[in-house]
Amino acid sequence: MTHAVIIPLFNKAGYIVKTLESLMLQTKMPDELIIVDDQSTDGSLEIAKDFLEKQSFSFRNCRIEIVSLQENYGPGNARNTGFLKTNSELISFLDADDLYHPHLLEVASQAFEKEGLEFLVLNMMFLPGGEVYPNLTALKKYLQPLSENLYEVIHPLKAVTSPRFIMGVGSNVITKRRWLTSIQYKTGSYLNEGIDFWYRVLKHILDRTAIGKVALLSGNYLQVTEVNGSLSRKTYAHFKEIDFPPVLSRYKNSKDHHDRLLMGMIGRRWYTYSIKSLKSPKQKILFIGHYSYLLPKYIGYTLRRLLS
């Protein structure tokens, strides 16, 4: 199957070469590589262009397109823009500081063709720490083995809303192009926008097909770099600087069981992240007070998860 890889690029000068090298070393090369530069100011785009020019022979069977955006609207907008440039059957978004295992695209293509997959989630190894997510043992009730390192996800919406399942963090989803034509990333959002996007894609697939499979690929085929200064390590002087996850706005009035489970999971993560990232005790207290109206709802969602 043909495969397009889309890289949103913003100020990753120290990482983009290794990311591109991980594509150059694939046993099955991508058919399309779309790089969307979101107004980088550190020379990232020039570094990427220089590498691709020097390695043009290695990428000779891959159509490469580089898009330079005129304004910075965040990674969601860059991914939306890149998708519109693709024609391949499979689509994946690769962050400019993450790495693919050399066999990933080959293994993924075979899995989609042999198993009739529609949606594939990759487990992740975080570097340099070495932590691996998700925890397969904790999720075993949702997983049915298909082949080595490949599991069908049973009850996908319940699985992906589990706190132990990670979908949409880093670059860990591959799906068929046809499922993305009517869904876009929320622009201007920087916190959990990937979870919001891929959850909507998954619901879209499950609403329209009863035969396509959702699967999880283990084996550490995706390496996610823990970058100093990244959002997960950012600190805030004022609680209102913290982005409000789009999931919490999108499903605040939803009666759907899985939407509520997702809100509970994201709400807890967001709360923990916010308290940890605020510098002063005063701002922590103000944050808790400002969003106190949400606490009964998330407590209810937590109980719903425990009882489901």
Image (tube, rainbow, N blue to C red):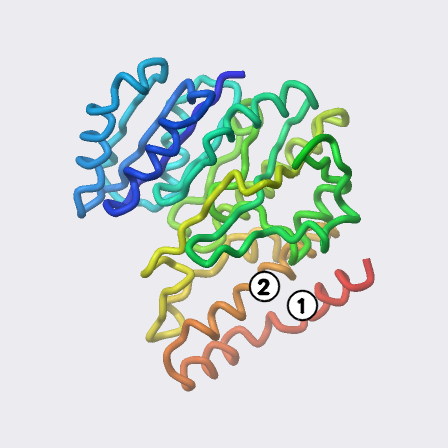
Left or right of residue 147: residue 86: left
- Which percent across, then down, holds residue 216? 65, 38
Q: Residue at x 58, y 44 (%)?
A: 123
Outermost bottom residue: 282
Which amino acid is tagged 2? Gly
Residue with the mark numbered 1: 297
- Which percent across, then down, holds residue 108? 57, 27
Is 16 or 4 nearer to us in this picture?
16
Name the secondary structure under disc 2. helix
Q: Are marks 1 and 2 in contact (CB under 8 Å)?
A: yes
Query: How would you rate the neighbour count of disc 1 (Cα within 10 Å): few for under 14, some for 14-19, many for 20 or more?
Result: some
Is 226 or 229 nearer to us in this picture?
226
Q: Quadrant of the N terminus?
A: top right
Q: Earlier in the sequence, mark 1 or mark 2?
A: 2
Left or right of residue 44: residue 299: right
Query: How would you rate the neighbour count of disc 2 (Cα within 10 Å): few for under 14, some for 14-19, many for 20 or more?
Result: many
Residue with the mark numbered 2: 267
- Which percent across, then down, holds residue 197? 53, 42
- Which percent across, then down, holds residue 308? 81, 57
Q: Residue at x 31, y 34 (%)?
A: 36
Tell me the quarter of the picture where residue 261 sits. bottom right
